[in-house]
Image: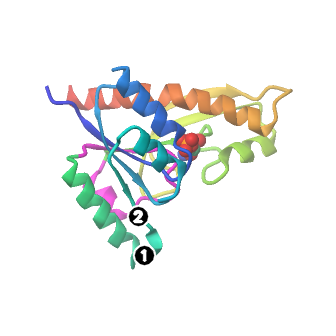
């Protein structure tokens, strides 16, 4: 049986890209990581992709006339690499109709809060400032909205009294790095059955 193929989209540090990469190495995640896509050519995640020999496509959105123009080029890359699933991991842009139509039901995102609470930017900071005692991580399908797609999985994280925003972020990221590969595996396997 051929393994499904994924592309990870990321804009920043790439710790979730790295967690996915490692899970594949350990064979906990049985898919091929065919491509990393980034809208930030100088980001850390590109350095990581180079280290791990993951093929990458990095682009500058401002060099394109529209979202459709750069998404069409991404789509060409995805087709060249025969990508089945798009895994968003800190990709700081809304996905537009070009990719949504081509990959309907095949785009996942991870968000560092218990959606629908605290969507959008700085979810951890938003939760911390709101003083909630429980926040967490959500993995969801992607639609045209900002963190609005159907929820697939969630894991709660307690905000303890002695925590600051930084320690909360660390705890949330530890959960992300476990949960995302596990759920990607579940979703991809189900889609084959
Ligand atoms: C993660 O917290 C993820 O939930 C959010 O963006 C962050 C990306 O972090 N969507 P990293 O680049 O994977 O370290």
Residue 192 position, x and y percent, is 21, 29
- Seen from the viewer's position, the closer of residues 51 and 73 is 51
Q: Quadrant of residue 54?
A: top left
Q: Is residue 8 left or right of residue 171?
A: left
Q: Residue at x 38, y 31 (%)?
A: 184
Residue 72 position, x and y percent, is 29, 66
- Does residue 21 appear anywhere in the picture? yes
Say if the magenta span includes residue 92: yes
Q: Give the residue pinned by disc 2.
A: 59
Which label was assigned to residue 63? 1
Say if the magenta span includes residue 115: no
Label 2 SS? loop
Residue at the outermost left position: 1
Q: Is residue 174 left or right of residue 26?
A: right
Indicate yes or no: mark 2 CB to ligand 1 under 8 Å: no
Q: Residue at x 26, y 53 (%)?
A: 78
- Seen from the viewer's position, the closer of residues 139 and 175 is 175
Q: Residue at x 19, y 53 (%)?
A: 80
Residue range corresponding to the magenta coloring: 83-104
Is there a contact, CB below 8 Å, between mark 2 and mark 1?
yes
Disc 2 to disc 1, how far (Cα)?
Answer: 8 Å
Q: On the rendered image, what quadrant is the C terminus found in? A: top left
């Amino acid at each position: 049986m051929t393994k499904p193929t994924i592309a990870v989209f990321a804009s920043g540090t790439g710790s979730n890209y790295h967690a996915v990469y490692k899970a594949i190495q350990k064979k906990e995640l049985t898919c091929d990581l065919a491509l990393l896509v980034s809208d930030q050519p100088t980001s850390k995640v590109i350095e990581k992709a180079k280290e791990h020999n993951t093929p990458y496509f990095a682009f500058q959105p401002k060099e394109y006339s529209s979202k459709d123009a750069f998404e069409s080029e991404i789509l060409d890359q995805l087709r060249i690499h025969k990508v089945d699933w798009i895994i968003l991991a800190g990709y700081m842009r809304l996905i537009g109709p070009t990719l949504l139509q081509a990959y309907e039901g095949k785009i996942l995102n991870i968000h560092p809060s218990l959606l629908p609470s605290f969507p959008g930017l700085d979810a951890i900071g938003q939760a911390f400032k709101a003083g909630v005692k429980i926040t967490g991580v959500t993995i969801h399908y992607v639609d045209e909205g900002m963190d609005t797609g159907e929820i697939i999985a969630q894991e709660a994280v307690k905000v303890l009294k002695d925590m600051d925003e930084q320690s909360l972020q660390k705890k949330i990221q530890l959960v992300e790095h476990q949960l995302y590969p596990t759920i990607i595996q579940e979703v991809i396997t189900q889609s084959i059955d």
